[in-house]
Amino acid sequence: MTLAKFLQRNLICKLYCYIAPKILGGQKSITPFSGEIGVSFVNEIKKLSFDEVIKIGQDILITANGVK
């Protein structure tokens, strides 16, 4: 099951997102939530509550709660 499917079914209660100061991309690049997540309009967005932001070396760790 992809991460998008977990998000679509509201099965994620805590999300850890690491951000590195690097750019990787292209037309066929995969994103963390590749696939249909069931959001077509702004009023359908999945809401998060940021819990913590930590700098680890050059990277950043964001912890979020309440994926709805």
Image: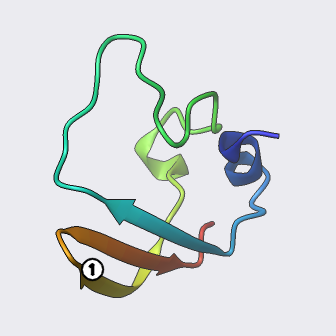
Left or right: residue 27 compared with residue 16:
left
> Where does residue 3 sit, x and y in percent of width and height?
68, 46
| Total marks placed | 1
Dot 1 alpha-carbon crowd within 10 angstroms: few under 14, some 14 to 19, many 20 or more: few
Q: Which residue is mark 1?
A: 56
> Where does residue 27 sit, x and y in percent of width and height?
34, 11
Image quadrant holding the N terminus, namely: top right
Pick out the residue farthest to the front: 57
How is this picture coloured? rainbow
Q: Residue at x 64, y 29 (%)?
A: 36
> Where does residue 20 sit, x and y in percent of width and height?
25, 56
Image quadrant assignment for residue 10: bottom right
Left or right: residue 28 compared with residue 3:
left
Pick out the residue farthest to the top: 27
Nearest to the observer: residue 25 or residue 44: 25
Compared with 20, 48 (above or below) is below
Q: Residue at x 68, y 75 (%)?
A: 13
Compared with 39, 59 (above or below) is below
Image quadrant holding the C terminus, namely: bottom right
Q: Residue at x 30, y 83 (%)?
A: 53
Compared with 63, 23 (above or below) is above
Nearest to the observer: residue 27 or residue 39: 27
Left or right: residue 66 compared with residue 45:
right
Q: Amino acid at mark 1?
A: Ile
What secondary structure is found at the residue carrying circle 1? strand
Compared with 60, 42 (above or below) is above
Image quadrant assignment for residue 67: bottom right
Nearest to the observer: residue 25 or residue 35: 25
